[in-house]
Amino acid sequence: MSTNRKSIGIVGARGHTGVELIRLIAAHPALELAFVSSRELDGQRVDAHVPEYRGELRYSSPAHEDLPKLGTDVVILALPNGKAAACVAAFDAAGVDPLIVDLSADYRFDPAWYYGLPELTREKWRGERRISNPGCYATAMQLSIAPLKDLLAAPPVCFGVSGYSGAGTTPSDKNDPDKLRDNLMPYALTGHMHEKEASFRLGVPVEFMPHVAPHFRGLTVTTNLYLARPLRREEVLARFHAAYGHEKLVSVTDDAPWVSHIAHRHHAEIGGFALSADGKRVVIVATLDNLLKGAATQAMQNINRAIGVDECTAVPSP
Ligand SMILES: NC(=O)C1=CN([C@@H]2O[C@H](COP(=O)(O)OP(=O)(O)OC[C@H]3O[C@@H](n4cnc5c(N)ncnc54)[C@H](OP(=O)(O)O)[C@@H]3O)[C@@H](O)[C@H]2O)C=CC1
Ligand SMILES: CC(=O)N[C@@H](CCC(=O)OP(=O)(O)O)C(=O)O
């Protein structure tokens, strides 16, 4: 392994987000993939599953307590919710302190972990070596609401529709193509984790109603916001351009974005900005690829920042 690159490992690399992370790391000039764990693919060549990876690495299945012995500079946890703590505890017990980025919801409310939604929180990073990556819908909701947060007259109401890759690979109704065919499946209509996450992180209550649809990847969040005073459309747009005009991975569009255009792309799109006649209600539409800006790309932004390279290193341009 060349010494000028940081070594990186992925725990839970068989999953949808793990595959995207392998692709991003394979093209990264400052990172070298050192291990990828999967119990199911243990022993198989990585390039047989992710052709973008060129190298000899094979999946492995280390026990949690053996992860610190692998000695990587960076560890990404891409496990289902509730599984990260055992890995984190293994590093703590061994006194080994790599940069850890957790994709699950497990540390999103933990003040000891930096919450990495770069466009909204990058100024708050204080060199933490533990980074909690935001949820996919929670990213879209926060990006949609933050520029108008000071003007809210009521909790924003967010209608979300995700492709079924959002439900991971463990079989369930929400990732069963037969049950999803010609269907739109509502779930967790109050109290979804991302409702709590967006409310907690924005500091205002947010109401969220998720649905899963028959497409594979990409999500839409349509947000209804009641405003405390009337705004003109140009004023709303000016706020979004001021917030995101300089951002490579957030595009502000005039029209409402379509989810079919965002699959496989690394940025979020925010548009629509439909105002009611009295100017006190605005509807905003955000799309992003749940596996990219909603997960792997956002993790890469966070890792890049933490290892001291440009935040968009190895992230293809929108
Ligand atoms: N999918 C999405 O759109 C998004 C997902 N996330 C979060 O990212 C994380 C990963 O998601 P995703 O890639 O979709 O998940 P998947 O279900 O697709 O993959 C999970 C991975 O974890 C491994 N795994 C499963 N159960 C266990 C276990 N009990 N112990 C150890 N390893 C296990 C699986 O491999 P194996 O069984 O072979 O070991 C697999 O590699 C989740 O926490 C999810 O909530 C965040 C944002 C968006
Ligand atoms: C369609 C679907 O099921 N989507 C997932 C969100 C995926 C995600 O961001 O997950 P975490 O917050 O768990 O990391 C869900 O609603 O739970």
Image (cartoon, rainbow, N blue to C red):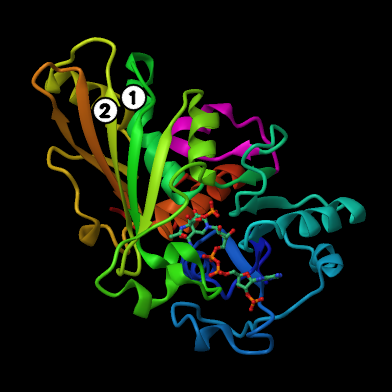
Reply above or below: 185 against 252.
below
The label shown at residue 284 is none
The region drawn magenta spans 114-129
Q: Quadrant of residue 33?
A: bottom right
The kind of residue on which mark 2 rests is Phe
Classify mark 2: residues with Cα within 10 Å, few (<14), some (14-19) or many (20+). many
Say what secondary structure mark 1 lies in. helix
- Tell me, yes or no, if residue 274 can be seen here: yes
Relative depth, front residue between 260 and 2: 260
Q: Callout 1: 10 Å neighbours few (<14), some, many (20+)?
A: some
Position of 11 compared to 187: left or right? right
Left or right: 10 in relation to 183: right
CA distance separating discs 1 and 2: 6 Å
Q: Going by the image, does 24 lie left or right of 109?
A: left
Q: Considering only order in the chain, which callout, 2 or 1, is on the residue closer to the N terminus?
A: 1
Question: Which residue is nearer to you in this view: 244 or 171?
Answer: 171
Q: Pointer 2: what residue?
A: 240
Q: Position of residue 228 (x, y in %)?
A: 29, 11
Counting from the top left corner in percent of width and height, residue 46 is at: 57, 83
